[in-house]
Amino acid sequence: MSAKHKQIHLAAHFPGVNNTTVWSDPRAGSHIEFDSFVHLAQTAERAKFDFFFLAEGLRMREHAGKLHELDVAGRPDNMTVLAALAAVTDRIGLMPTITTTYHEPHELARQLASLDHLSDGRAGWNLVTSSDSFTGANFRRGSYLDYGQRYERGGEFVQAAWALWDSWPVGEPLADADSGAFLSRAPVGAFSFNGTQVEVAGEFTVPRPPQGHPAMLQAGDSDEGREFAAQYADGIFTRHGTLAAGRSFYADVKERLARYGRATEDLLILPGATFVLGDTDEEARELADHVRRQQVSGPHALVFLEQLWNRDLSAYDPDGPLPDVDPDLDSPVRSEGSAQARTLNRDAVAIAAQWRERAQTAGLSIRELVIEMTARQSFVGSPATVAVQLNEHVQADACDGFILVPYLTPGGLDRFAGEVVPLLQERGVFRADYTGTTLREHLGVPATQPGV
Amino acid sequence: MREAERGLLDFVTLEDSHGLQSTVADVADDRTDRVRGRLDAIMLAARVAPLTRGVGIVAAADTTVTEPFLLSTQVATLDFVSRGRAGWLLQVSTGERDAGYVGPRLVPEPGARYDEATEYVEVVRQLWDSWEDDAEIRDAASNRFFDRRRVHHIDHAGTHFSVKGPSITPRSPQGQPVVAALVLGAAQKALAAATADVIIVPAKDDRQLATAPERIADAVAAAGREPAEVRVLADAVVFLGPDRTATLERRHRLDALAGASHGADALVFTGTPAELADVLLDWRELGYDGFRLRPGAIPHDLDQVTRALVPELVRRGAFRPRYEADTLRGLLGFNRPAGRSAPRSSAGAAIT
């Protein structure tokens, strides 16, 4: 029976600097102490997840020219914390989000290759491109990259990383004590890549990584992002939509693969997804409502609205009606460092009109509207219900699996691991144990061959 | 690392370089008989951190090609994952080919790179202090996770960098992780004196060995710092064994294999652990706070340090019998530095 079913891929996203993490719950632990990372990574590994995922943000979020203090803030360096996790885990993949705009290709390729060696083939990277000069203010590069250039740099970044990882022949170093030969030939590691945005040359010090090329995801749903993923990535980290939206996205991305001589199974579609579990579906729904209210406090709702309105709305009552003024399109953007705000600002006046109409029709306050408009829990129900829903999405080709974002740190995955995963295993749609040792093996994406 | 920890050592340094090791300056030597290649030192340091509990971990990273913002978060994170045992061995690359690793960005002319490094350390230290210790408040009443008055932009605008800040990483267990620097020449001495907590001096001969502590103290004073803010360590390569003659023979055999003499850049000691204990106590009289011992061969000479030299020094009352601090700063006798604290008037305590 299981042979007829697609296998589900599952990953754990460490909660933290976003507006879905509930920090006010008494069970909410530290978002910076190493123990929290260990807890979630080991929980996910016991549940046989493909990988442990970290988001990235290289500048603290600001709103109206001030640091945004309502949500969790403060995070470690992704590469460093994953290298430490390699010491206390054995099988689970280690996936940092990395922007190609502010990292340097040689340094990152070297750290990823090192991580791959130090974890025996478990390193991955979730590539994002960014263009904001807001984050650039923390870097020497500093400069703004326009939309086209950021993908140009992203593509060159990947090609340069591949060239570096291929710079040592397979089998080196020999380290043969009998003959005294450390290498069988020299030179090794010489590289040179000449692009418009990336121009590197030198010697690479790290022998070929165990996976050849550590597995790569691309995050971004835009047309350019999809095309980039089809060309370079082993998976795509997308936003979760409805079943129908997921199927259409899935078909679109998979269709693009042929253009690059790739098979449909060479790239996985992995949406981020939240979940709330209860003993019964009814209890889960009540809990989900409670979680939503914790995630969206009154001040949160006003800040969210200010992202769209681009005005100071602090005088408004979050439990009252929506502002009757229109968004301010002329002033500088109030909210920085939030992907959500950038998306919203494109059609602000039209969206504001829709929201106002929705609030009037349904009789919603500002806070109630924001709760409704912002990301809902993707999967809410008893463990049995959630298992069925997850499987349905995968079998219907809306995705190949999920990157799960718990709302609590560090214990937010415990119940899922203990109660939902066994149900998926019983159905034969999720591995009962790891069958491979590398991240590529967990994902089922082919290992790269030397010279490819 | 575990062997070093067994020997109660203060810290282990992990070296690094952009290009391959070479016996020739600034170019690959294409030798196949020597170890070539290495992993990134920060990654390696983080990987061993959870496997150890007492020993400090000092990873090399370079100021010429890495970003100060990223390096500051990496070392702070190493401090979190090691629970306060992180250090950074400051390196300045002066090779002609270093720009190749970050192209098309340009790097300063080799002569300007120490000036850049001084500014670099200043930026890193400011980022480490950009969060106050008590910035995270989790105040349910005001819905605030942190208090923004306790997290600061650094607004650094210097000759070589502009960095806005604050760090994305809260203040780490040590507050300021340890900065160590090796002094081989005048430019390095000035940089180390201005920025480092631990200064390692690889003396080439007895005269240098005898005069270095005073020269370092003068440079530290010239940089406007107190000598007590700095620990000065002598660097030495050690070949150790219970039998002096056999140890000498072993060293010569290793030199012959390598085709070069060991320790062209530092003093080399060959002898018994008890003899080395005598020598180190003599050196201490010259004004050194400690020593970085580079085992001639691993694991043999490291084991001799941890299992023979250390017990000998403990017997003489010159070395700790157990770890007496749980951070690297503590082992070195430094306090945890107070961070920034914003003036907070009672009016300022209101929720804004």
Image (cartoon, rainbow, N blue to C red):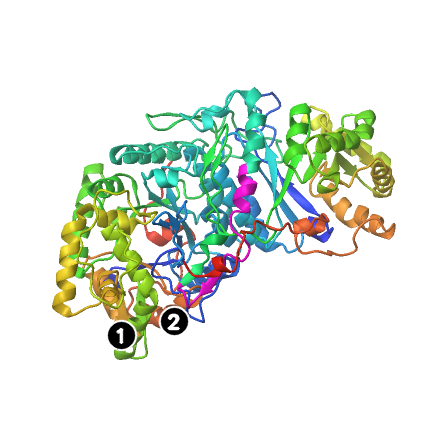
Please state, as top left, top right, bottom left or bottom right, where the C terminus of chain B lies in the image.
bottom left
View extreme (front): residue: B347
Location of residue A192 in the rendering, given as x and y in whole percent from the top left corner: 41, 25
* Residue A304, quarter of picture: bottom left
Q: Which residues are magenta?
A: B123-143
Query: Is residue B134 rendered magenta in the image?
Result: yes
Q: Nearer the viewer, residue B244 or B178?
A: B178
Location of residue B78 in the rendering, given as x and y in whole percent from the top left corner: 55, 48
Q: SS class of the residue under badge 2?
A: helix
- Left or right of A391 in this view: B151: right
- Left or right of A377 in this view: A190: right
Look at the image and tell me whether residue B38 can be seen.
Answer: no
Q: Which mark is residue A415?
A: 2
Q: Which mark is residue A285?
A: 1
The residue at the point 65 percent across, 53 percent down is: B327
Location of residue A76 in the rendering, given as x and y in whole percent from the top left corner: 48, 51
The answer to whether marks 1 and 2 sit on the same chain is yes
Figure check: B12 above or below A106: below
The residue at the point 33 percent across, 26 percent down is: A195
Label 2: chain? Answer: A
- At label 1, which amino acid type do we have? Arg
- Left or right of B212 in this view: B282: right
Q: CA distance from mark 1 to mark 2?
A: 16 Å
Look at the image and tell me whether residue A129 can be seen.
Answer: yes
* Residue B276, quarter of picture: top right
Query: Is residue A447 rendered magenta in the image?
Result: no
* Classed neighbour count for the residue bearing mark 2: other residues with Cα under 10 Å, few (<14), some (14–19), many (≥20): some
Label 1: chain? Answer: A
- Left or right of A5 in this view: B3: right
Figure check: B313 above or below A204: below
* Residue B133, quarter of picture: bottom right
Q: SS class of the residue under badge 1?
A: helix
